[in-house]
Image: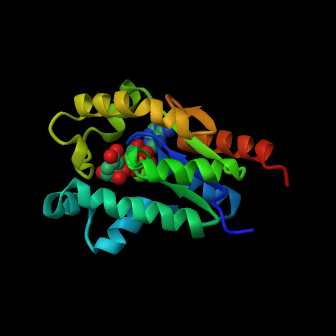
């Protein structure tokens, strides 16, 4: 059978995809991969610079390619950037992955808990200006997509990343018996 990730994490900025994914991978003894890092490696510069120099459409094109490559070849835990699920081709790939028994985790978070996690960090160009308002607008548009593409929904409000990772791990163990 072809390679497939142990789990794919989706959700809005600040839901903890990168942080929880790192804990989850470490606990499961597998590699962690993040499409944001893949995009930065291909572009040779940070995401903020890609947005400024080349624009969001260029970032999204790199991101879609990075998701397709990672879904095809990564066997560990895979975190997507928060907006990756907006691409219809990515939605189709996630549906195929889920149909093959893959686990797509929607890490959910409410504005009150997400705001302090992302508020003072300048590395997310889409949140610049008014992070709370920008985040709320993104989440309103994306929530139905996160719900549709995911097979597992975990609320992270008020929970430490390690505890969230443990919850995800237990659910994966139930869904994918050894
Ligand atoms: N469950 C959590 N509780 C508190 N802080 C968190 C939690 N998950 C992540 N964080 C913090 O929030 C920030 C954003 O987390 P990150 O993993 O980068 O989110 P994402 O990749 O979904 O945008 C980081 O500073 C991280 O330490
Ligand atoms: O929500 C988005 O559209 C984005 C989220 C970011 O990743 P995180 O969700 O890991 O912050 C990163 O891909 C880029 O800044 C765009
Ligand atoms: Mg991230």
Q: Which quarter shows the C terminus?
A: bottom right
**Res. 40 image quadrant:** bottom left
Q: Is 1 left, or right, of 168 in this rendering?
A: right
Coloring scheme of the render? rainbow
**Which residue is painted at 24% across and 41% down in the image?**
127
**Res. 39 image quadrant:** bottom left
Of 40 and 94, the residue lying toward us: 94
Residue 50 vs 113, above or below: the answer is below
**Which residue is painted at 29% across and 72% down in the image?**
43
- Outermost residue toward the right? 178
Q: Position of residue 141 (x, y in %)?
A: 35, 31
Q: Position of residue 33 (x, y in %)?
A: 51, 63
Residue 19 vs 76, above or below: the answer is above
Q: Position of residue 29 (x, y in %)?
A: 69, 63
Q: How many marks?
A: 0
**Which residue is painted at 37% across and 46% down in the image?**
83
Q: Which quarter shows the N terminus?
A: bottom right
Of 126 and 59, the residue lying toward us: 59
**Which residue is painted at 44% across and 61% down in the image?**
35
Note whether residue 109 is visible: yes
Note whether residue 18 is visible: no
Residue 94 vs 132, above or below: the answer is below
Of 92 and 71, the residue lying toward us: 92
Of 59 and 159, the residue lying toward us: 59
């Amino acid at each position: 059978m072809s390679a497939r990730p142990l789990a794919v994490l989706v959700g809005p900025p600040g839901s903890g995809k990168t942080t929880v994914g790192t804990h989850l991978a470490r606990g499961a003894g597998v590699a962690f991969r993040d499409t944001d890092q893949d995009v930065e490696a291909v572009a040779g510069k940070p995401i903020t610079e890609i947005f400024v120099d080349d624009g969001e459409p260029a970032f999204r094109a790199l991101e879609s390619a990075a998701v397709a490559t990672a879904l095809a070849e990564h066997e560990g835990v895979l975190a997507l950037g928060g907006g990756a699920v907006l691409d219809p081709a990515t939605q189709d790939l996630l549906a195929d992955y889920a149909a093959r028994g893959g686990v797509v985790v929607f890490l959910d978070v409410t504005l009150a808990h997400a705001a302090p996690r992302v508020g003072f960090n300048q590395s997310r160009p889409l949140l610049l200006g008014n992070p709370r308002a920008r985040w709320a607008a993104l989440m309103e548009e994306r929530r139905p997509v996160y719900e549709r593409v995911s097979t597992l929904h975990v609320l992270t409000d008020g929970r430490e990343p390690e505890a969230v990772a443990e919850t995800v791990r237990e659910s994966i163990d139930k869904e994918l018996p050894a």
